[in-house]
């Protein structure tokens, strides 16, 4: 197999011929530029050079094998080039944000001093990179729905019963027939490697130790096989499906996770278009200003006209190729026709139900000014009770 020098790779740094280096191997991504969910710009930024640092935290290891033909896998760097890339990575000057994170990690409080989720979130905001924090914590537009979901929990209270035997309480339950130690599970969320190099595998191991269930995102930063390999024997994992607009690609993904042993498909139905996650979109600008020490100003010259396209941010690109034309009549029968796994509809907004189980949970990143999940559940239960009462009286 041909090996490549850095000079040879550097010749291919345009949209007409775009090569990149990832983990000391060379790839021709020219024909993939227009298909990349995040747009061609981010790839062209690294055209003709090493893209490993930008690529690894947000892509599973098998992404290139799945999305790029074998003919575009051009081969390894030659030994001199590989040494130069390794040395460049080792001697790279750390950014101000990386130095901030290093300091914050050294100053974390003892774990037993973190008493609740608010404490954990406060520490996370300090130790995560600015880009990661913006991705994990952002929501659509003015984030009103995000805020109202938190407020909604304050509206609901326990009606305690007294004089009951409670010395042997059992909070365990089952979800789709699988035992869980508490009525809580790990919901699907993408790009865990942004927060830790071992990514979703950490969540899998934690779920095994605490006997709860993990739902794995379509946009996981590890491969679905790697996550399953991290699971304990007989540990149930569910799979959250973002359905690709291409049925054959979507079917291949479903069949892959079924073969790997995932126990249910959770179809996301409330994330059809990228949300306007302003906080996420702003993150690169804030980082650039942090590094340069000066703000960016609008250019006045006619030769430097801005496109006006702010981009999707880290999150928006993840759903760019999702199916925007799903329907009850078409999508559900299609999905039931390709898998025997239980089907959960994730993101229900009204009382329509056509699945083994319905999850009322919101994509806060896609639904600006939508009624929050708990209030939606309250309304749906009320509606259902009224419907039953009317049917009984008819």
Image (cartoon, rainbow, N blue to C red):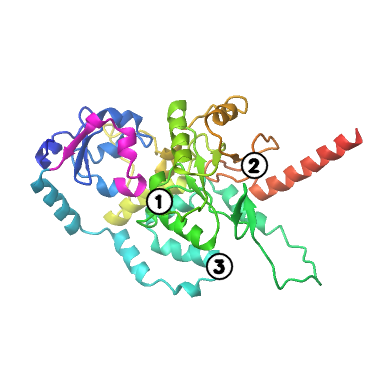
Label 1 SS: helix
Residues tagged 1 and 3 counted as in contact (Cβ below 8 A): no
Q: Quadrant of the N terminus?
A: top left
User: Which numbered tag is attached to residue 338?
Assistant: none
Label 2 SS: strand
38 lies left or right of 3: right
How much space separates mark 1 and mark 3, taking CA atoms?
Answer: 30 Å
Residue 82: x %, y % from top left: 14, 48
Q: Residue at x 14, y 42 (%)?
A: 77
Classify residue 24 by image quadrant. Answer: top left
Q: Residue at x 32, y 59 (%)?
A: 97
Camera-side residue of 264 and 247: 264
Q: Is residue 73 magenta?
A: yes
How much space separates mark 2 and mark 1, taking CA atoms?
Answer: 27 Å
Q: Residues within 10 Å of mark 3 (few under 14, many from 20)?
A: few
Camera-side residue of 93 and 55: 55
Q: Quadrant of the C terminus?
A: top right
* Residue found at the very far front of the displayed protein: 233
286 lies left or right of 26: right
128 up-or-down from 255: above or below: below
The residue that disc 3 covers is 116
Write the start and end of the magenta stretch as one range.
55-77
The residue that disc 1 covers is 229
Nearer the camera: disc 2 or disc 3: 2
71 up-or-down from 286: above or below: above
Inspect this view and state whether residue 182 appears: yes
Labels 1 and 3: the sequence-earlier one: 3
Q: Residues within 10 Å of mark 1 (few under 14, many from 20)?
A: few
């Amino acid at each position: 197999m041909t090996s490549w020098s850095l000079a040879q790779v550097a010749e291919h740094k345009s949209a007409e011929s775009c090569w990149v280096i990832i983990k000391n191997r060379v790839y021709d991504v020219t024909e993939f530029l227009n298909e990349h969910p995040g747009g061609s710009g981010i790839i062209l930024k690294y055209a003709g050079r090493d893209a490993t640092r930008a690529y690894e935290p947000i892509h599973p290891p098998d992404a290139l094998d799945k999305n790029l033909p074998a003919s575009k896998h051009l081969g390894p760097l030659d030994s001199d080039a590989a040494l130069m890339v390794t040395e460049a990575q080792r001697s790279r000057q750390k950014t101000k944000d990386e130095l901030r994170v290093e300091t914050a990690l050294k100053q974390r409080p003892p774990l037993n001093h973190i008493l609740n989720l608010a404490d954990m979130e406060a520490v996370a905001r300090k130790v995560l990179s600015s880009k990661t924090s913006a991705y994990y914590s952002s929501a659509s537009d003015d984030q009103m729905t995000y805020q109202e979901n938190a407020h909604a929990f304050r509206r609901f209270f326990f009606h305690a019963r007294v004089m009951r035997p409670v010395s042997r309480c059992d909070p365990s339950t089952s979800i789709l027939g699988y035992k869980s130690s508490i009525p809580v599970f790990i919901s699907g969320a993408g790009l865990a490697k942004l927060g830790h190099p071992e990514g979703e595998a950490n969540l899998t191991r934690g779920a095994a130790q605490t006997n709860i269930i993990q739902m794995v995102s379509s946009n996981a930063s590890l491969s679905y096989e790697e996550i399953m390999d991290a699971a304990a024997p007989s540990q149930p994992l569910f799979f959250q499906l973002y359905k690709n607009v291409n049925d054959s690609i979507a079917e291949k993904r479903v069949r892959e996770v079924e073969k790997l042993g995932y126990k249910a498909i959770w179809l996301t139905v409330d994330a059809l278009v990228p949300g306007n996650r302003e906080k996420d979109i702003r993150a690169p600008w804030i980082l650039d200003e942090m590094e340069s020490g000066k703000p960016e100003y609008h250019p006045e010259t006619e030769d430097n006209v801005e496109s006006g396209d702010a981009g999707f941010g880290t999150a928006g690109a993840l759903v760019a190729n999702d199916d925007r034309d799903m329907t009850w009549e078409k999508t559900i029968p299609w999905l039931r026709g390709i898998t025997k796994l239980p089907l959960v509809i994730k993101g229900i907004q009204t009382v329509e139900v056509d699945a083994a189980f319905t999850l009322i949970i919101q994509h806060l990143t896609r639904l600006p000014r939508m009624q929050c999940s708990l209030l939606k559940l309250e309304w749906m239960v009320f509606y259902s009770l009224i419907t039953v009462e009317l049917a009984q009286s008819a």
